[in-house]
Image (tube, rainbow, N blue to C red):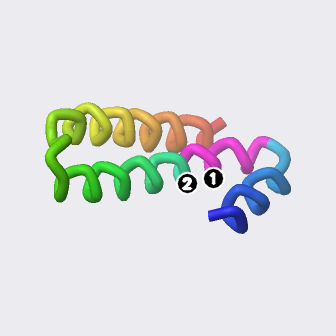
Amino acid sequence: MQDVIAMAHQMQGSGAVSELLRLSAALLEHCAYELARSDRRGQVSRIILISAELERMARDAAMQ
């Protein structure tokens, strides 16, 4: 995980925004899947919605 964070800190420029948002969305989506396996399932749908919003933001940023 530290490698991912280090890579993210090295990204710069307008293209980085879109990629960082996509990375954030992917991490949140994975978190939701892991939470779904536990007793804390109530948060899963909220996390998936946040992940989807980050994906939309990434697409918008890529168009600019």
Residue at screen point 44% across, 43% down: 55
- Majority secondary structure in the magenta region: helix
Relative to 61, does residue 27 appear above or below in the rendering? below
Left or right: 43, with 50 as reference point: left
> Could you say which is closer to the camera, residue 26 or residue 3?
3
Contact between labelled residues 2 and 1, with CB atoms less than 8 Å apart: yes
Disc number lying in front (1 or 2) = 2
Q: CA distance from mark 1 to mark 2?
A: 6 Å
Residue at screen point 63% across, 52% down: 19
Relative to 37, does residue 60 appear above or below in the rendering? above
Residue at screen point 50% across, 34% down: 57
Relative to 3, does residue 41 appear above or below in the rendering? above
Tell me residue 13's x, y (percent). Answer: 83, 45
The quarter of the rendered structure image containing the N terminus is bottom right
Circle 1 is placed at which residue position? 19
In the image, the segment drawn in magenta is: 14-21
Left or right: 56, with 6 as reference point: left
Left or right: 2, with 41 as reference point: right
Tell me residue 7's x, y (percent). Answer: 76, 62
Which image quadrant for residue 2?
bottom right
Identify residue type, mark 1: Glu
Identify residue type, mark 2: Leu
Tell me residue 15's x, y (percent). Answer: 73, 49
Circle 2 is placed at which residue position? 23
The quarter of the rendered structure image containing the C terminus is top right
Residue at the limit of the structure toward the bottom, as seen here: 3
Badge 2: how crowded within 10 Å, few (<14), some, or many (20+)?
some
Residue 20 within the segment the image draws in magenta:
yes
Which image quadrant for residue 11?
bottom right
